[in-house]
Image (tube, rainbow, N blue to C red):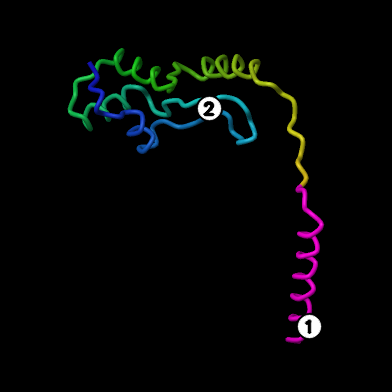
């Protein structure tokens, strides 16, 4: 049984054994996929040594699933999950937003630019 006082998910993230692999860009709206980046046995051994607990492989994998960290046997399994998630994402591109400035703010910026140009020309 895994002792709840140990936060193995954060420990593995600090050790760079767990990482986010998808979505790659912050503009993606998909749910982040966190996976174990090393073999499960290596991560399990590291957690066991850190906590001093005896953890079975099944308990460890179930713990990772509860913390939304996925384990894959091979790359094909990862590709299948990724494709399933892509079907759920709305693919409409985001519209670029133009910054809206009030006339007072535009005038203030113009005056600042004029002052800066005068200051530069006076120094030459």
User: Residue at left 55%, top 28%?
Assistant: 22
Task: Please provide percent x and percent y for residue 83.
Answer: 61, 17
Q: Which residue was labeled with disc 2?
A: 32
Q: Which residue was labeled with disc 1?
A: 121
C-alpha span from label 2 to label 1: 52 Å
Is residue 22 highlighted in magenta?
A: no
Residue at disc 1, secondary structure: helix
- The quarter of the rendered structure image containing the C terminus is bottom right
Task: Please provide percent x and percent y for residue 85.
Answer: 59, 17
Give the extent of the magenta segment.
Answer: 99-124
Identify the main secondary structure in magenta. helix
Residue furthest front in the image:
104
Residue at disc 2, secondary structure: loop
User: Residue at left 64%, top 16%?
Assistant: 88
Residue 113 sits above or below residue 16 on the image: below
Of residues 87 and 80, the one nearer the viewer is 87
Q: Is 40 left, or right, of 75 in this rendering?
A: left
Answer few, some or many: residues within 10 Å of disc 2's Cα (few below 14, many 20 plus, some between 14 and 19). some
Is residue 119 highlighted in magenta?
A: yes
- The quarter of the rendered structure image containing the N terminus is top left
Q: Quadrant of residue 6?
A: top left
User: Residue at left 45%, top 32%?
Assistant: 19
Viewer-side label of 2, 1: 1
Q: Is 101 left, or right, of 54 in this rendering?
A: right
């Amino acid at each position: 049984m895994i002792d709840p006082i140990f936060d193995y998910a954060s420990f593995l993230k600090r050790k760079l054994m767990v990482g986010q692999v998808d979505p790659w860009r912050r503009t993606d709206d998909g749910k982040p996929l966190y996976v174990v980046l090393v073999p499960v046995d290596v991560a399990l051994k590291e957690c066991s040594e850190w906590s001093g607990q005896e953890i079975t492989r099944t308990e460890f994998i179930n713990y990772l699933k509860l913390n939304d960290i996925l384990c894959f046997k091979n790359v094909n399994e990862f590709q299948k999950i990724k494709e399933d998630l892509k079907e759920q994402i709305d693919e409409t591109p985001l519209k670029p937003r133009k910054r809206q400035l009030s006339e007072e703010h535009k005038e203030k910026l113009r005056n600042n630019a004029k002052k800066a140009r005068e200051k530069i020309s006076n120094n030459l």
